[in-house]
Image (spheres, grey):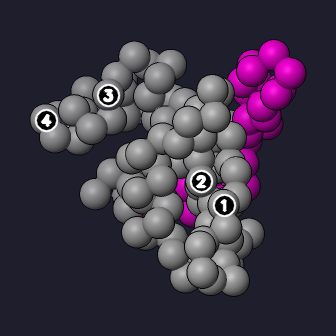
C-alpha cells in the first residue's frame, strides 16, 4: 500500500489516496480518509492514513477481514486483540523496492501509540 495524492477537479485542493501495490485505490480506506479526515492538514491526513495502512497490514498478516470481524466479534478473541495492541506498539518501515514490510524492534512513544488507538477506534466504527 502507498499514499498518492490526487488533485480535486475544479478546486485548488489535493487529497490523499491509498492505493495497493498495483496502483488501484482501496475503497474502504479511501472512504475513511475522505469522510473522517477531510479538513485536516495534509501532513495529518498522511500520518493518519499511514496508521490505517498499519492496521490493514496487521489484518492481512492475521488473515482476517476487518469488516467481517467488526460486524461479528469485534476482536473479542483475546489473542487477536492483544496481537493488535502489540502491532500498534511497533514501528514499521516499508522497503518499496521489494514490497517488504519490516518491523523495527523499538516501540512508538506513548503519544503516538495513543493516536494510533484513537484512529483505530474511529476506523473500526
Report whether 123 appears left or right of 10.
Answer: left
Residue for badge 3:
65
43 magenta-colored: no
Q: Is residue 60 visible?
A: yes
Asked whether the residues under the numbered discs 1 and 2 touch, taking CB atoms below 8 Å apart as contact, a structural biologist would say yes
Front in this rendered view, residue 105 or 66? 66
Asked whether the residues under the numbered discs 3 and 2 touch, taking CB atoms below 8 Å apart as contact, a structural biologist would say no
Q: Nearer the viewer, mark 3 or mark 2?
A: 2
Residue for badge 2:
17
Residue for badge 4:
72
Give x and y (percent) for residue 26. 48, 41
Residue for badge 1:
6
N-terminal-most mark, 1 or 2: 1
- Between the residue at mark 3 and the residue at mark 4, the CA separation in whole angstroms equals 11 Å
Numbered range of the magenta stretch: 91-119
Q: Secondary structure at mark 2?
A: strand
N-terminal-most mark, 4 or 1: 1
N-terminal-most mark, 3 or 2: 2
Q: Is residue 82 above or below residue 7?
A: above
Asked whether the residues under the numbered discs 3 and 4 touch, taking CB atoms below 8 Å apart as contact, a structural biologist would say no
Q: Quadrant of the C terminus?
A: bottom left
The residue at the point 70 percent across, 51 percent down is 4
Amino acid at each position: 500500500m502507498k499514499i498518492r495524492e490526487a488533485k480535486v477537479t475544479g478546486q485548488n485542493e489535493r487529497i490523499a489516496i491509498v492505493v495497493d501495490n498495483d496502483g488501484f485505490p482501496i475503497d474502504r480506506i479511501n472512504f475513511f480518509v475522505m469522510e473522517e479526515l477531510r479538513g485536516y492538514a495534509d501532513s495529518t491526513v498522511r500520518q493518519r492514513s499511514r496508521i490505517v495502512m498499519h492496521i490493514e497490514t496487521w489484518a492481512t498478516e492475521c488473515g482476517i477481514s476487518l469488516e467481517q470481524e467488526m460486524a461479528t466479534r469485534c476482536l473479542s478473541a483475546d489473542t487477536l486483540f492483544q496481537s493488535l495492541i502489540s502491532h500498534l506498539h511497533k514501528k514499521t518501515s516499508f522497503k518499496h523496492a521489494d514490497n517488504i514490510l519490516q518491523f523495527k524492534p523499538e516501540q512508538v512513544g506513548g503519544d503516538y501509540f495513543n493516536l494510533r488507538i484513537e484512529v483505530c477506534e474511529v476506523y473500526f466504527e
